Image (cartoon, helix red, strand yellow):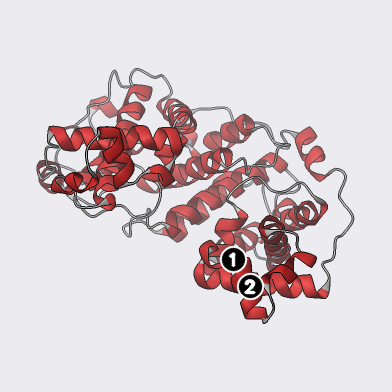
Amino acid sequence: MSEDLQGTPAALVPDAGRELEGRVLPGAGLTVAERMVVDAAVPELKPRVREIVDVARRLLDEDGIDALSMRAIAARLDVRAPSLYKHLPDKQAILDVLVADILRENGDVMRAAITGAEDPVGAIISGFRRWALEHPQRYRVAMDGPLADTPLVQSAALHSGDPLRWAMRDDLEGAVTLWSFAHGLVDLEMKQRLPPAYDPGMVWARGVAHLRHADDDIELPPPMQGTASTSEFWSDPPEDVTLSPRAARIVEVARELLEEDGEEGMSMRRIASRLGVRAPSLYKHLPDKLAMENAIIAHVLREMGGIGMAAGAAAAAADEDPLVAVMTAYREYAHAHPALYRLYTRGRLDPGPLVRGAELRSAEPIARATGHDGVAAMTIWSFVHGLVDLESKGRVPDTYDREAVFLRGIAALRPVEGRTW
């Protein structure tokens, strides 16, 4: 390891290839020579392409990804849409250049965050969180699916990831574990999906403290932190709400369509067609599509809660680790039912009794497996959610042992010595 990496850096050298000369480049599976080939192959953007991408970025920031179209970009540039194809062949090409642009911006922000910082890990996570929450549309686009296998995008991804790998002292598995937590928690924050009872800052502090290296000499937060938040979360459980048999059947069909064709395929008309009835008749049982979605979410929450409880109980009976079992069941369910998982994690939960009661049911397994340490449970959930999301989008390279990352995160974040159930 070079002398620059042994102490607090004065600045992070932008060209990681030079800093790590003679070693495999962290996180990329590339030699320095191979990294140089990737970087050298990055095309220089022509002025008109740069102009198109700048307009696309402004549209993204103003109105989100749905506002991005060739027609909208052309209108902002005061040209006809077909003229754009001379420079970029389609919307995906624009998105690829935009993603590369955002990843490079992210890498620059992370470099600035750790330059001269006494605590590089803390600084980079704080900088990451601040940047992502200030630019949610950019972050969503940059993280929305697999990256294009082009030098432009791959070089930008390496540039974005270098600072965290550097701050984690080339511990690649540790860097991915910490990234999974940070991505998961910032995603939950953006979507307002974290239960309101919990202070996100407390969850961030605990997660980063436990996932960084022990020899960083950072004091760990005390156990059972935020007991008032935990009490608030579990307070005032609602009475059970039971759907009528007809409503339950409608939800069952809606779920089938959701899993087959995604949210676009789950229309009231298609549900009615599969049931052999007219669409207006569905509103006697569920007043609108939002009520339908809430009923599906409640069903998923209760199903996940039941699966988690069974997994934890089986592990405890076999003298195995209930926490690992519960979170393994969660991860497997998410991958087996991606459309349901996206719906369940897409935004703030409805506060009504149907969903609220199901939310408490779904939280029982992790609560028991963490000894009812609510903040610890939130850090573990954030980590596993982040890992699941990265895995589902093809963002964890095959060079990493994902099971090892999963187990490392659980081991680091668990709140108590031994096992609880």
From the viewer's perspective, is 191 left or right of 416? left
Q: Up-down: is 73 above or below 308?
A: above
Q: Nearer the viewer, residue 353 or 164?
A: 353
- Which residue type does callout 1 highlight? Ser
Q: Nearer the viewer, residue 4 or 33?
A: 33
Read off the residue under disc 2. Answer: 271
Q: Secondary structure at mark 1?
A: loop
- Classify the position of the C terminus by image quarter: bottom right
Going 71% across and 54% down the picture, which residue do you hit?
369
Q: Residues within 10 Å of mark 2 (few under 14, many from 20)?
A: many
Determine the image quadrant of residue 19. Answer: top left
Going 66% across and 74% down the picture, which residue do you hit?
272
From the viewer's perspective, is 92 left or right of 19? right
- Classify the position of the N terminus by image quarter: top left
Residue 360, horizontal then vertical, whole percent: 77, 53
Q: Which mark is residue 8?
A: none
Q: Residues within 10 Å of mark 1 (few under 14, many from 20)?
A: some
Q: Up-down: is 37 above or below 130?
A: below
Going 64% across and 70% down the picture, which residue do you hit?
254
Q: Nearer the viewer, residue 267 or 232?
A: 267
- Which residue type does callout 2 highlight? Ile
Q: Up-down: is 121 above or below 278?
A: above
The answer to whether one can see residue 27 in this image is: no
The answer to whether one can see residue 193 in this image is: yes
Q: Are marks 2 and 1 in contact (CB under 8 Å)?
A: yes
Cα distance, mark 2 to mark 1?
6 Å
Read off the residue under disc 1. Answer: 267
Going 70% across and 57% down the picture, which residue do you hit?
294
Residue 317, horizontal then vertical, whole percent: 73, 70
